[in-house]
Image (cartoon, helix red, strand yellow):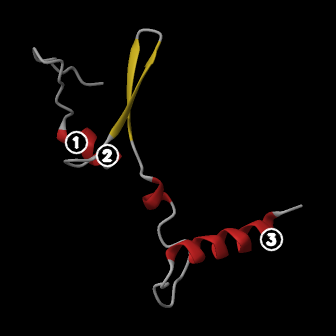
Amino acid sequence: MEVVKVDKKGRIMIPKHIREKVNVKEDNYVKIRVDEKSIIIEPFEPVADKYFAVFKISKWPEDLDDFVNEVIGKWWTQNAM
């Protein structure tokens, strides 16, 4: 547990060792939620980072919309019951 001071604008400083532990860097976003009387701050992962390198692309598609439709179609075919 750490104790930090809230400044007059409502900001807090997250100690460096905590930022490093949860991989929060300058200009990253975090999620903030309230649970009863607690404030919970969690790193926010963009969807693009979550699915980075899921699909291998041999060359960049000329039409991104067609590519997305093709990928979704393949996924739907494999996962439909």
Q: Is residue 2 left or right of residue 51?
A: left
Query: If you read the primary sequence from the N terminus, does the residue marked by circle 3 or circle 1 appear first?
Result: 1
- The answer for how far apart the CA atoms under marks 3 and 1 are is 45 Å
Which numbered dot is residue 17? 1
Q: What is the three-letter code of the residue carrying label 3? A: Thr
Q: Is residue 41 left or right of residue 19?
A: right
Task: Find residue 13 and report its horizontal and vertical position in percent.
Answer: 16, 30
Q: Residue at x 47, y 67 (%)?
A: 52
Query: If you read the primary sequence from the N terminus, does the residue marked by circle 3 or circle 2 appear first?
Result: 2
Which residue is disc 2 drawn over?
21
Q: Residue at x 42, y 52 (%)?
A: 46
Check whether the beta carbons of the residues at disc 1 and disc 2 lie within 8 A of each other: yes
Q: Residue at x 64, y 71 (%)?
A: 69
Instruction: Identify the residue at the far left of this view.
Output: 8
Mark 3, secondary structure of its residue = helix
Figure quadrant of the N terminus:
top left
Mark 1, secondary structure of its residue = helix
- The answer for how far apart the CA atoms under marks 3 and 2 are is 39 Å
- The answer for how far apart the CA atoms under marks 1 and 2 are is 6 Å
Task: Find residue 33 and report its horizontal and vertical position in percent.
Answer: 42, 24
